[in-house]
């Protein structure tokens, strides 16, 4: 069993979860309630999507520093500090592990063998009640193997969600804009291949060229596309970088849509800034609290 199997969700740092809710509802997403994570000193809310892989969640998480009791862990301060400075956006990729305790042992052994280049993990286990869309109560439980000393190229951690029924709620996975699943994350780098190999060293999987200036790295089936800036602009247009974030950084996600034309019409009717490049409809970071969102048609057999 590998300590990291697949992409699970993307954690984004934001300043105001209430404002995020208003923004994303305008964009046509169904977004869950604000949930204080007591004891950790943060609050979150989620856009739940439909997993394509077994025993995985698939969602975008928005996290606000503060909003709950407890001391904020230093790794969350590090991952999300930009949100305090007005730089909202992706903070960390959270990867699926099928056994958080095994992942913890794996990375602890790695640290013990090479303390200088390894990283000491932390095992975080939480369990709490969460209201569903019709005020029903879910028990949510997860075990995370956190890697707080892991510095860029990109922040990541692992999660074993043991109560997936909450994340598979049909009501919250239906979105007026047609969003279905997160099928890829996107990053910018001055050296995509070096960034990809640094991640391969942590999660294994594959590293493949994916066109000029683009490398795809993945522990499973959901890739991280890592692009040079020129390749990013060619593929997605201009909404890439505001000049305040050092490279590399996670810039966005790919989402499938149930009907590409209906998604386009939704954004047109609601006056939402977007661009279309081929079969990609792109929402810029200015619309999405620092995150680029690229809609694509769902693949059919």
Image (spheres, rainbow, N blue to C red):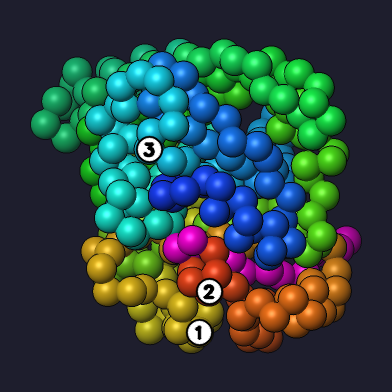
Image side of residue 222 versus residue 200, left or right: right
Stretch of the chain drawn in magenta: 289-301
Residue 292: x and y, percent?
52, 67
N-term mark: 2 or 3: 3
Of the two numbered discs 2 and 3 in the rendering, the one whose residue sits closer to the viewer: 3
Q: Which residue is mark 1?
A: 237
Residue indicated by mark 3: 65
- Mark 1 to mark 3 CA distance (whole Å): 31 Å
Q: Position of residue 251 (x, y in %)?
A: 44, 63
- Is 296 magenta? The answer is yes
**Direction from residue 183 to residue 247 in the image, left or right:** left
Seen at 71% across and 33% down, the residue is 167
Alpha carbons under labels 2 and 3: distance apart: 24 Å
* Quadrant into which the C terminus falls: bottom right
User: Is residue 29 one of those drawn in magenta?
Assistant: no
Which residue matches tag 2?
A: 284
Residue 265 seen from this side: yes
In the rendered structure, which disc, 1 or 3, sits on the residue that comes first in sequence? 3
Residue 233 or 217: which is nearer the viewer?
Answer: 233
Residue shown at 59% from the left, 73% from the top: 283
Mark 3 crowd level (few <14, some 14–19, many ≥20, 10 Å Cα): many
């Amino acid at each position: 069993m590998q300590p990291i199997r697949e992409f699970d969700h993307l954690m984004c740092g934001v300043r105001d979860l209430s404002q995020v809710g208003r923004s994303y509802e305008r964009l046509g997403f169904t977004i869950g309630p604000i949930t204080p994570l007591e004891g950790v000193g943060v609050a979150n809310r989620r856009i739940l999507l439909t997993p394509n892989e077994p025993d995985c969640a698939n969602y975008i998480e928005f996290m606000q520093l503060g909003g709950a009791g407890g001391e904020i862990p230093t790794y969350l301060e590090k991952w999300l500090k930009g949100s305090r400075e007005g730089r909202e956006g992706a903070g960390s990729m959270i990867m699926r592990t099928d056994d958080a305790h095994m992942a913890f042992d794996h990375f602890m052994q790695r640290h013990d063998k090479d303390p200088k280049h390894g990283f000491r993990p932390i095992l975080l286990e939480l369990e709490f009640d969460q209201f569903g869309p019709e005020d029903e109560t879910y028990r949510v439980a997860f075990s995370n193997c956190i890697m707080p000393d892991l510095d860029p190229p990109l922040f990541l951690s692992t999660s074993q969600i043991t109560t997936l029924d909450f994340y598979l709620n049909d009501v919250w996975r239906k979105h007026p804009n047609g969003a279905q699943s997160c099928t890829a994350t996107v990053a910018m780098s001055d050296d995509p291949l070096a960034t990809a190999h640094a991640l391969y060293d942590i999660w294994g999987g594959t590293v493949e060229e994916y066109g000029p200036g683009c490398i795809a790295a993945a522990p499973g089936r959901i890739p991280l596309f890592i692009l040079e800036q020129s390749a990013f602009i060619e593929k997605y247009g201009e909404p890439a970088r505001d000049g305040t974030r050092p490279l590399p950084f996670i810039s966005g996600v790919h989402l499938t849509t149930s009907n590409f034309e209906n998604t386009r019409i939704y954004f047109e009717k609601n006056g939402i800034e977007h661009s279309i490049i081929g079969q990609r409809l792109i929402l810029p970071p200015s619309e999405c609290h620092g995150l680029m969102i690229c809609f694509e048609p769902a693949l059919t057999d």
